[in-house]
Amino acid sequence: MKPLATLLSAAILTFGTLSAMADPISEAVANEHRAMKDRLRDEYRNPQQTLRFFGIEPDMTVVEIWPGGGWYTDILAPLLKDEGKLVAAHFHVTDKSPKYYSRYLKQFKDKIANHPPYANIELTEFDVMKAPDMTKAGSADAILTFRNVHNWYMQKGEESLNNAFKAFYKALKPGGILGIVDHELPESADDAAMKDSGYIKKSLVIEAAKAAGFALEAESEINANPMDTANHPRGVWSLPPSLAMGDEDKEKYLAIGESNRMTLKFVKPKN
């Protein structure tokens, strides 16, 4: 049997080697400030694989559109804190905004004021119609938005989509990345379902991005869920984490898990 000191030395050496091998994205996902309830979503949201697919690096200037409660911000903030910059383009609140806009924005501002990993975040706002300029034109290396594109379509249809992608194109540097994750509606479904289901067709997203000048560089099945039919009584909100149906068929929706999602990487051409 090896002496305890030898075993401890080997364990420390192994831990040090593993730590050295850990990449910045993995370290950001594993950071101690993330709540356990958020970590449980990693199974469905695959943040490490998603951010690697988008090509996010620690020295980038990244704009996160509509960060909401900060699920992805809790990963992006520590990732970009030292070498890069995170711009959080949050809700543009008016008297006519949904009440949750103000609630989430207040919570986010409180976090910036009191949560150390958020210390260097630049807070701006974004609205596809009223506040499209979320950051200085041509300044961003990457723009990311998670589960939001369907919201803009639900506002004013294709007009909203076109405004959003034009704004993203303007904000990015030549060669900049636009990363999108959203709930995917099957192409065979009726277009009317996009008005209130929370799902949107991938073809429509790609069409709007290309119309703004973007090139589709790649798409991934990282966040796909073949168990999701996208046909539920309360739309995507029937599924976790919302579980809008309450106890009705709850076990069924928990078994399905979170929605089937497209993961698309667009690039603003350099020329």
Image: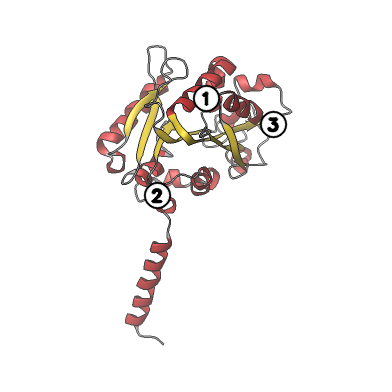
In front here: 96 or 178? Answer: 178
In front here: 75 or 85? Answer: 85
Mark 2 and mark 1 residues within 8 Å of each other at the beta carbon = no
- Dot label at residue 28: 2
Looking at the image, tell me whether mark 3 or mark 1 is earlier in sequence order: 1
- C-alpha separation, residue under disc 3 versus residue under disc 2: 33 Å
Q: Is residue 160 above or below residue 263?
A: above
Residue at the outermost right position: 188
Mark 1 neighbour density, 10 Å: few (under 14) some (14–19) many (20 or more): many
- Dot label at residue 186: 3
Q: Is residue 82 above or below residue 92?
A: below
- C-alpha separation, residue under disc 2 versus residue under disc 1: 28 Å
Residue visible at 63% across and 39% down in the picture: 252
Looking at the image, tell me whether mark 3 or mark 2 is earlier in sequence order: 2
Comparing marks 2 and 1, which lies closer to the viewer?
Answer: 1
The quarter holding residue 103 reads top left
Across and down, in percent, residue 1 comes to: 41, 87
Q: Is residue 158 above or below residue 19?
A: above
Q: Amino acid at mark 3?
A: Pro
Question: Circle 3 — which element?
Answer: loop
> How is colour applied across the structure in the image?
secondary structure
Q: What is the count of numbered marks?
A: 3
In front here: 39 or 62? Answer: 62
**Which residue has dot 1 on it?**
165
Mark 3 neighbour density, 10 Å: few (under 14) some (14–19) many (20 or more): some
217 relative position to 109: left or right: right
